[in-house]
Image (cartoon, helix red, strand yellow):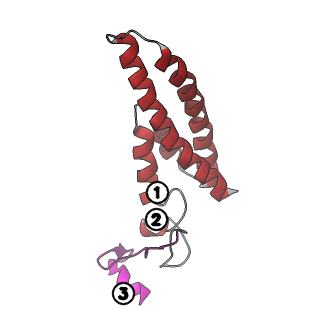
Amino acid sequence: MREKVTRLFVVTAIAEAFSWAGLLVGMAVKYGPPGNELGVQIFGPIHGALFAAYGLLTLAVAWVHRWRVPVTIVALVCAVPPFATLVFERWARRRGLLGGGGAARQGQGGGSAVQGDGDRDPAPVVASGDRVPGGVDAAEVVR
């Protein structure tokens, strides 16, 4: 369930950004020289549905991954500016907020000191030079 909701969130974040692009092009055509409203009539409802789905999925992912309130608010606000959902999704993935190994890298998660992100090519969570509490090099802790 957790992975499915997270996957839907990522797909929706990407689709919402593409629908923004379509809507912006439609608005440029509508208010530009051609004066054709077809693009807005097509992409407006698509973007509206994806905007609402992104908001609901953000709340679901925040719940299952136990995000803090400020992170959830930022994720919701990112639905408003064009393409910000892409930026948030990448930021959240790098920080481990979408599951996988990033949380341990940031000192937020539990579990093994070295774990993959669930993809086919798992990356180590710690690298030489990363510090853990007490100022010890994380690579030394793993050895």
Disc 1 target residue: 93
Q: Which residues are magenta?
A: 119-143
Q: Give the label, 3 or 2, closer to the camera.
A: 2
Q: Is residue 9 left or right of residue 32?
A: right
53 lies above or below 118: above
* Residue 29 visible to the viewer: yes
Disc 2 target residue: 102
* Residue 80 visible to the viewer: no
* Residue 54, quarter of the rendered image: top right
Q: Residue at x 56, y 28 (%)?
A: 46
Q: Amino acid at mark 2?
A: Gly
Quadrant in the picture for the C terminus: bottom left
Viewer-proximal residue among 132 and 38? 38
Q: Residues within 10 Å of mark 2 (few under 14, many from 20)?
A: many
Q: Amino acid at mark 3?
A: Glu
Upstream in sequence: badge 3 or badge 2 = 2
The local secondary structure at tag 2 comes to helix
Q: Amino acid at mark 1?
A: Arg
Q: Is residue 58 magenta?
A: no
x, y percent for residue 107: 45, 67
The residues tagged by marks 3 and 2 sit, at their Cα atoms, a distance apart of 19 Å
The local secondary structure at tag 3 comes to helix
Q: Is residue 33 left or right of residue 22?
A: left
Q: Residue at x 41, y 85 (%)?
A: 141
The local secondary structure at tag 1 comes to helix
x, y percent for residue 20: 45, 30
Disc 3 target residue: 140
